[in-house]
Image: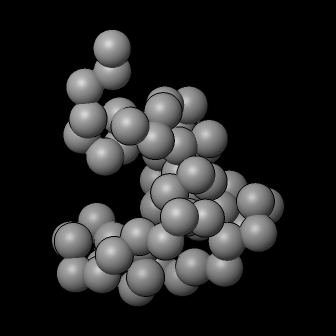
Amino acid sequence: MKQKELLAQLQVRGVDMNASGLSKLEGQIRYVTDIELVALADILEVSVDKLLGREEK
């Protein structure tokens, strides 16, 4: 998924983020908020645990 598409999907879910903010998340320069984390998990169709690198049991 391209960055523009991901940003559009985030905005649909009420998360106002720009390309700079997304790049900072990707580069681990800033922390992700709980709302952003849930939205990203929904968009990517994975669990929050998966995004956090936790093993699912």
Residue 46 image offset from top left, x and y in percent: 49, 31
Q: Is residue 10 left or right of residue 36?
A: right
In the picture as drawn, the residue positioned furthest to the front comes out as 57
**Residue drawn at point x = 60 percent, y = 43 percent:** 43
The image's colouring method is one colour
Compared with residue 50, is residue 5 higher up or lower down, i.e. above or below? below
Compared with residue 7, is residue 48 higher up or lower down, i.e. above or below? above
In this rendering, the count of numbered labels is 0
Instruction: Judge by depth and name the residue closer to the eye, 50 or 7.
Output: 50
Q: Is residue 19 left or right of residue 25?
A: right
**Residue drawn at point x = 58 percent, y = 52 percent:** 38
Instruction: Judge by depth and name the residue closer to the eye, 21 or 52.
Output: 52
Residue 56 image offset from top left, x and y in percent: 33, 21
The quadrant in which residue 57 appears is top left
Residue 31 image offset from top left, x and y in percent: 34, 76
- Specify whether residue 5 is in view: no
- Specify whether residue 19 is in view: yes
Instruction: Judge by depth and name the residue closer to the eye, 5 or 39.
Output: 39
In the picture as drawn, the residue positioned furthest to the top comes out as 57
